[in-house]
Amino acid sequence: MLEKIKEIREAMQQELQTAESAGQLRDLKVKYLGKKGSISELSKSMGKLSPEERPQAGQLVNELRCLLEENLEAKQKEIAAKAMQARLAAEQLDVTLPGAPVKMGTKHPLTLVVDEIKDIFLGMGYTVAEGPQVELDYYNFERMNLPADHPARDMQDSFYIDARRLLRTHTSPVQARVMDQMRPQYPIKIIAPGAVYRRDDDATHSPMFHQVEGLVVDENISLADLKGTLLNFVRQMFGEDREIRLRPSFFPFTEPSVEVDISCMLCGGEGCRTCKNTGWIEILGAGIVHPNVLEMSGYDSEKVTGFAFGFGVERIAMLKYGIDDLRVMFENDVRFLQKF
């Protein structure tokens, strides 16, 4: 047995030295460690030895197995290193060639506009608030002074999930949620940007679009504060020579309510096709927060007042960048997006 172990050891070491490929190493592993391999056969024949011979023979067989495994691993690393060196020597690398250009991405125009809006209002002391896009009917409508039988609900064709939940039709629910969190504390100065959903789809409407709404709650808030805030925003967004005008309107959650127009940036108010020869372009809706909305949020409408406003980000982007079809902003056409 001892003589046989010695012979296998010598043969194994000689074959390892002459092996030059990973395939030859695999064959050697099978030859010596496989089910019918030489070392495996030695282990099977241990039972034929006397009790006195088994310990020494068993130790030698185990040492032989460990030696083979260690040598196979070392030889495998040596062969892999040689192969790598051969590949590197064969490759020709011209270090004078220019590097491959890295294509830089740009922000989407809607992202650019939202970022600019945030910067403007953060500069005026506002904070940014967010809320869920799958909203409760209670927050989306009832807390905005729109009970279940209110006809103004028909103005917002909605995507309902079930009887109680829907995809929010505006970001106004964020205002109610913020007032719930803050009451009875004030002042509140927030903007709420985010995606909203309505069943509209044409050149100026999309089933999914983006809004930014603002809310201020404090003592002695008036329509003059609202106008000054919006004038400051419009001039920072569209230029210092812009003017605004307020027209009476109706929104269930504000009273009084106004539509806000800006002087046309193309004709300077003289009249053109863009402004339909009026010199003005409608841009957003706003108003003084309705007392019912304040009361439902736990605020004393005799003590505090507020104003709210809301506008579509897509409309701002269309005016700012001269885009005539809202849908191109959602088509992912690289030719369009590269302009920004």
Image: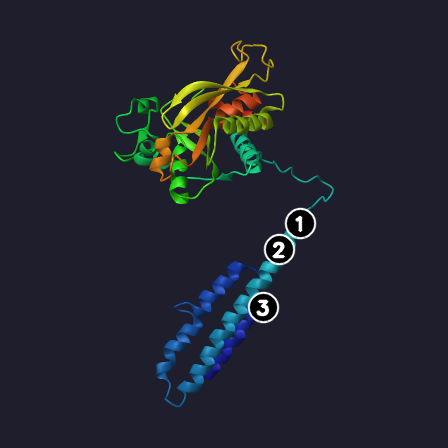
| Residue 218 coordinates in the image, percent (x, y) | 46, 37
Task: For mark 1, give the secondary structure.
Answer: helix
Task: For mark 3, give the secondary structure.
Answer: helix
Mark closer to the chain start, 3 or 1? 3
Q: Within 10 Å of the Cα at label 2, are there few (<14), some (14-19), or many (20+) other Cα atoms?
A: few
Q: Where the C terminus falls, by quadrant?
A: top right
Q: Amino acid at mark 2?
A: Met
Task: Depth check: give the residue in front, 106 or 60.
Answer: 106
Total labels drawn: 3
**Residue contact at pointers 3 and 1, CB within 8 angstroms:** no
Farthest residue toward the right?
A: 96
Q: Is residue 206 visible?
A: no
Q: Amino acid at mark 1?
A: Ala
Q: Amino acid at mark 3?
A: Gln
Cα–Cα gap, marks 3 and 2: 20 Å
Residue wearing tag 3: 17
Residue wearing tag 1: 90
Q: Is residue 14 visible?
A: yes
| Residue 42 coordinates in the image, percent (x, y) | 41, 77
Residue located 39% across and 21% down the image: 250
Residue wearing tag 2: 84
